[in-house]
Image: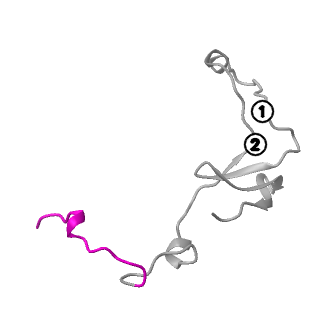
Amino acid sequence: MTPKTDQDRTPVTPGQGAPLLTLESPAVQEVTVELVARLGTARMSIAELLALKRGAVVTLDQQINAPVDLLLNQNIVARGTIVAVGDRFGVRIDDVAPAA
């Protein structure tokens, strides 16, 4: 059996064939994603980075009460406030980015 090429495939137009997936589709809703909570950033030279030792403090560009960014694929999807959840950290969502 030879593999099909793009020329062998029949184009599907909306309304034909399998339905298009949307964010509300059960198959999409089961996809697991990873959110990253970004407290801030720091710029330093390689020499400064290599000089870091246990106990060193890296000062971030955000103030202590600044919102925390939640990122999905390096895009901000929400902002919130750091909270304690038992013995862990959490983020209380204060603002959600509009859907694209």
Quarter of the image holding residue 41?
top right
Quarter of the image holding residue 63?
top right
Query: Are the residues at dot 1 and dot 2 in contact (C-beta closer than 8 Å)?
Result: yes
User: Label for residue 60?
Assistant: 1
Give the tally of numbered discs.
Answer: 2
For badge 1, the amino acid type reads Leu
Please provide percent x and percent y for residue 99: 66, 65
User: Label for residue 39?
Assistant: 2
- What's drawn in magenta, residue-wise? 1-15
User: Label for residue 11?
Assistant: none
Indicate whether residue 7 is drawn in magenta.
Answer: yes
For badge 2, the amino acid type reads Leu
- Upstream in the sequence, badge 1 or badge 2? 2
Q: Residue at x 79, y 60 (%)?
A: 95
> Residue lying farthest left?
1
Q: Nearer the viewer, residue 86 or 24?
A: 24
Quarter of the image holding residue 50?
top right
